[in-house]
Amino acid sequence: MSLRENLVKHMNEAAKAQDKTRLGALRNILAQVKNKEIALIKRAEGLSDEEVVAVIKTMLKQSLESIYQFKKGGRQDLVDKEEAELKILQSFLPPQLSRDEIKGIVSDIVKNLQISGPKDIGRVMKDVMPKVAGKADGKLVNEVVKEVLGG
């Protein structure tokens, strides 16, 4: 079952259970996926699971920014709503790698490429990112690479 089909299934279950928060969040995800399909002219074949994950990650970043802004504005009611939707978004993402797991991957690549200093961060990142795609945030990976290379 594709990720999109799984989203539709969960949306139908939320509708039957009358879980308005979950239903609203899932409808929003599917609307964003549909918008992306239209933008990429992929209506017939639909988006791949990786592309759906990318849409969800974008929504996750927007949600985190909204939470920050609502907290700054003293709107706890909106913070609570966004945090509930954030948990729903996170439930559809693959499990994230820990810092130690990323460090292990980076160390292996550094050994294989025989790299010694911070001047080769770009080469390491180029090899690391495909291995951790969808499972780690790029900013965290960059921090770990700099840490391992001493930069």
Image: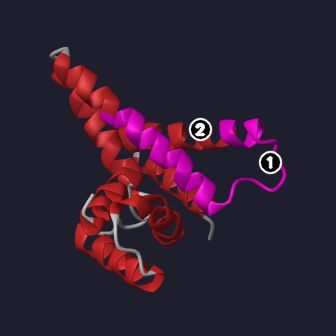
Answer yes or no: do the residues labelled 2 and 1 have beta carbons within 8 Å? no
Nearest the viewer among 25 and 23 is: 25
Secondary element at tag 1: loop
Residue 105 vertical placement versus 5 (above, below): below
Rendering coords of residue 129 (x, y %): 49, 64
Identify the image's colour scheme: rainbow, by chain, secondary structure or one colour.
secondary structure
Q: Amino acid at mark 2?
A: Gln
Magenta part mainly helix, strand or loop?
Answer: helix
Per the rendered image, the range of residues in magenta is 35-64
Q: Is residue 105 left or right of residue 68?
A: right
- Residue on which the image places disc 2: 32
Q: Residue at x 16, y 24 (%)?
A: 76
Magenta segment: does it hold 7? Answer: no
Residue 42 badge:
1
Q: Amino acid at mark 1?
A: Lys
| Mark 2 / mark 1, whichever is N-terminal | 2
Q: Residue at x 67, y 60 (%)?
A: 48
